[in-house]
């Protein structure tokens, strides 16, 4: 089963991932899975988070 990876911040579609990959190999910083959508951070937003720590996001 494939799930869609979306950026949590900018809603950009990052790609698709096999759900099996998530459970067996959690290298990606997946934060939340809703239905068949996995919310994570795209590389640029991840970089912004590191540059500006202390941002409160939900
Ligand atoms: Zn993003």
Image (cartoon, helix red, strand yellow):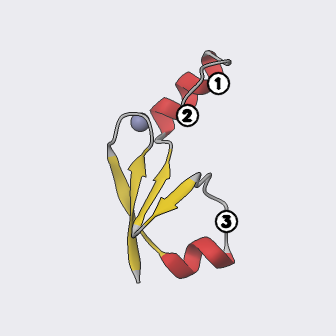
The vertical placement of 30 against 55, above or below, is: below
Q: Nearer the viewer, residue 58 or 18?
A: 58
Front-most of residues 8 and 15: 8
Q: Position of residue 51 (x, y in %)?
A: 62, 17
Question: Who's the residue at 50% across and 38% down the image?
Answer: 43
Residue at image location 32% in from the left, 43% down from the top: 12
- Residue 3 falls left or right of residue 30: left
- Lower position in the chain sequence, tag 3 or tag 1: 3
Tag 1 residue: 50
Q: Which residue is mark 3?
A: 26
Quote the CA–CA distance across marks 1 and 2: 6 Å
Classify mark 2: helix, strand or loop. Answer: helix
Q: Quadrant of ligand 1?
A: top left
Label 2 beta carbon within 8 A of ligand 1: yes
Where, quadrant-wise, is the N terminus in this rendering? bottom left
- Dot 3 alpha-carbon crowd within 10 angstroms: few under 14, some 14 to 19, many 20 or more: few
Rendered image: mark on residue 46: 2
- Helix or strand or loop: what does disc 3 sit on? loop
Q: Marks 3/2: CA distance?
A: 17 Å
Picture coordinates of residue 53, whole percent (x, y): 67, 19
The number of numbered discs placed on residues in the rendered structure image is 3
Mark 2 surroundings: few (<14), some (14-19) or many (≥20) residues within 10 A: some
Name the N-terminal-most of marks 3 and 2: 3
Residue 32 - label: none
Disc 3 from disc 1: Cα separation:
20 Å
Q: Residue at x 59, y 71 (%)?
A: 22
Q: Residue at x 61, y 15 (%)?
A: 52
Q: Quadrant of residue 3?
A: bottom left
Placement of 13 over or under 18, stated as above or below: above
* Image marks 1 and 2: residues in contact by CB distance under 8 Å: yes
Q: Are marks 3 and 1 in contact (CB under 8 Å)?
A: no
> Could you say whether the residue bearing mark 1 is in a helix, strand or loop?
helix
């Amino acid at each position: 089963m494939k799930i869609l990876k979306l950026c949590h911040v900018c809603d950009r579609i990052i790609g698709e991932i096999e759900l099996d990959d998530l459970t067996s190999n959690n290298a990606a910083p997946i934060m939340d899975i809703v239905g068949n959508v996995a919310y994570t951070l795209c590389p640029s937003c991840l970089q912004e988070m590191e540059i500006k720590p202390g941002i409160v996001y939900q």
